[in-house]
Image (cartoon, rainbow, N blue to C red):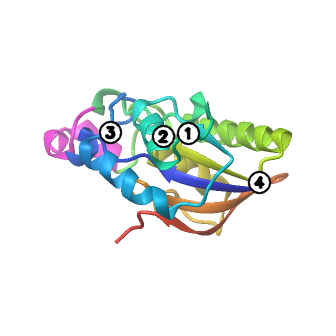
Amino acid sequence: MELILIRHGMTPGNLERRFVGSLDQPLAPQGEALARAVAPTLPPVEHLYVSPLTRCRQTAGLLWEGVERTTVPNLRETDFGPYEGKCHAELQDDPVYRRWLSGELSVGEPIENCNRRAAAALEEIARDCAARGWKRAGVVAHGGLFMSMLSQFGVPRRAYYDWLFENCGGYRAELTADPLTLTVTGAVGKVRE
């Protein structure tokens, strides 16, 4: 089966380069416009799997209007703890923040938790698609969640940050349930410039 993996459109926090994480922000007008522009470029899907956060639910409705969707709680974004809603300029003098950026310590949700959630979400989607006989489904979620998912299960193998998604951008991938694998076949939506 094929999955179309798409990151949500821009939020006000994304436009200000803030750590949005688990904050439940709606799309900014620019995010809505981008989703409308990308929608005609995407292949049709039989079903949608969507993060519970507003920005993903709005994006899904704009990209694939009227398509039935399932909310998957494990598709939510990483929680950045005390850095939620903050931007680099506000934090750059904080020694704990600098240690977090260098990978010395964990602040907020540990990457291992996000990795477990990404794996659980992908397993749930694989089971549901197989049970319903769907050949192509869309997944609308978050950049960090997708980077966790693809760094674990993506082919070709790439490091976490090498799977960075643009807003309303992503990948087509063939999903294999056993072993759990996402073989990336191409880019979709807004691609990195």
Crowding near the residue tagged with mark 4, few <14, some 14–19, many ≥20 C-alpha atoms within 10 Å: some
Hey, which quadrant is residue 75 in on the image? top right
Q: Is residue 54 above or below residue 41?
A: above
Q: Left or right: 16 with respect to 34?
A: left
Q: Residue at x 56, y 34 (%)?
A: 113
Circle 1 residue: 66
| Place of residue 67 in the rendered image (x, y in percent of width and height, measured from the top left) | 60, 41
- Assign a secondary structure to mark 3: loop
Q: Left or right: 14 with respect to 178?
A: left
Circle 3 residue: 27
- Assign a secondary structure to mark 2: helix
Circle 4 residue: 135
Residue type (three-letter) at the residue carrying disc 2 = Gly
Of 15 and 77, which appears nearest the observer? 15
Q: Which quarter shows the N terminus?
A: bottom right
Q: Of callouts 1 and 3, which one flags the residue occurring earlier in the amino acid sequence?
A: 3
The numbered dot on residue 61 is 2
Work out whether residue 147 can be spotted.
Answer: no
Residues at badges 4 and 2 in contact (C-beta under 8 Å)?
no
Residues at badges 3 and 2 in contact (C-beta under 8 Å)?
no
The numbered dot on residue 185 is none
Separation of marks 1 and 2 at Cα, in angstroms: 7 Å
- Assign a secondary structure to mark 1: loop
Q: Of callouts 1 and 4, which one flags the residue occurring earlier in the amino acid sequence?
A: 1
